[in-house]
Amino acid sequence: MSVLLAFSAFINFYFYNSARQYLSSKLNTVSGMLSQYYADNPASFSSEVRSIVENWSEKNRMELMTVSGAGQVSMTSSGFMPDRDVITQDYFDAVESGKSGSFTGRLPSGEKVMAMSIVTPDTKGDFSVIRVVASTERIDRQIAGLITIAAVICGAILALMMFSGMYFIKSIVIPVRQVGITARRYARGDFTVRIPVTSDDEIGELCDIVNRMADDLSQSEAMRNEFISGVSHELRTPLTAIKGWAETIGSMPDDSETIVKGMRVITTETERLSQMVEELLDFSRMQNGKFTLNKGNVDILAELGDAVLIYTEKAKKEGIELVYTEPEDLPAVYGDRNRLRQVFINVIDNAIKYSEKGGLVTVQAILSGENKIEIEVSDTGCGISPEDLPKIKTKFFRANHNKRGSGIGLAVADEIITMHSGTLEVFSEQGMGTTVVIVLPVRQEMKK
């Protein structure tokens, strides 16, 4: 509104000032001509004044008139002799100052005019003052038209701003506020809410990303809870066995056969507990960034052979054929021998765990090209579904909930191989089996 008022004031000033300057220039031109003529030929001054007034070229825009020293209109360019009431303040100012005067206002008839007067050399005669009068009706119409246009433009701009503001609120402010509300619910552990995606712009992309993040967090939370439940169960089982056999041995101190059998079970379950605790410690170190490697030259054949040997007897007991195709020689790898053996043990253990009686597990290692060693562990077990395969290396994830395990072993194994600048890939077809391929770089000095 203030802009429109300022614009109206400027337009009003501009048009009236321009009209005033135009009238002044025309009046000064006539006054100059009359002054020059009066100086050159004063006897013919009256006839010259009449000639100028009668032949006035601006009749359509303004009226030129002469006024006597007594204040009576003596002649007009229109030929119409108005009443004395048309004499306005400009005449009196000009007579009083002996120079000129101007007036902008309304006549007694209500007509709004702009008038300018200037004295002539004939101060006592019929043409003592020459005067121009113009109606401001045309100026007012132009000003009103421009103000109307400006008002329409301002209204359109205001409407556009309001529409833009509403659009901004609807498309940006509300979604961002919703993102904030939803994020606070996520911070409290509530991953059930999702943000409606109502646009394809950056805000819509942000909402979609937040929703996907919620899906991942929800899935991670579910896997974490399942992991806690699974670990609790896995810990309870060997502890129950150890406690049971310890009580049995304590109640039958003279039964050597029972004692031997019980000690064997206790030893086995203790090893299971140790392995699980080690996995948990490794996972904790990975999460805290404290997982380190003690690197040196590693004989891959020796470590892989030891891992196969550990599971040979177990595979035989479970009716699974474990076949190890050992190459004659492989170059050394620069790495942590204990961690690499841990990876091989985990992969072979999984292969046996997910194989049925009568199944086959094969282990082989080859030199791939000149600078890589490829270890492949395959089984003929249940396989992994296409939906679960992309998540198989995710921490806490277990494709088969009926099998024991914490769900972090393969995640730790993948991290160990990555820290050795290698890769661990899992290929599987449900119902056909799974193949794990580990690729490790050969130490360059050894290769040379």
Image (tube, helix red, strand yellow):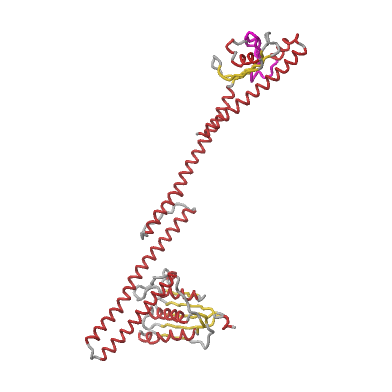
Q: Where is residue 32 in the image (x, y as percent from the top left)?
A: 72, 18
Name above or below for residue 138 compared with residue 86: below
**Residue shown at the point (37%, 57%) measured from the top left:** 185
Name above or below for residue 284 compared with residue 368: above
Query: Picture quarter containing residue 285?
Result: bottom left
Residue with the most extreme front position = 97
Name above or below for residue 423 compared with residue 324: above
Q: Where is residue 129 in the image (x, y as percent from the top left)?
A: 66, 13
Q: Main secondary structure of the magenta part?
A: loop
Counting every numbered tag in the picture gives: 0
**Residue shown at the point (59%, 15%) measured from the top left:** 89
Residue with the most extreme right position = 40
Name above or below for residue 119 compared with residue 404: above
- Left or right of 185? Residue 289 is right
Q: Position of residue 58 (x, y in %)?
A: 67, 19
- Left or right of 44? Residue 244 is left
**Residue shown at the point (36%, 66%) measured from the top left:** 222
As rendered, which of 438 and 282 lies closer to the eye? 282
The boundaries of the magenta stretch are 55-80
- Is residue 79 rendered magenta in the image? yes
Residue with the most extreme left position = 251
Q: Is residue 426 visible to us here?
A: no
The quarter of the rendered structure image containing the C terminus is bottom right
Query: Picture quarter containing residue 136?
Result: top right
- Is residue 4 rendered magenta in the image? no
Q: Is residue 80 visible to us here?
A: yes
**Residue shown at the point (59%, 23%) measured from the top left:** 138
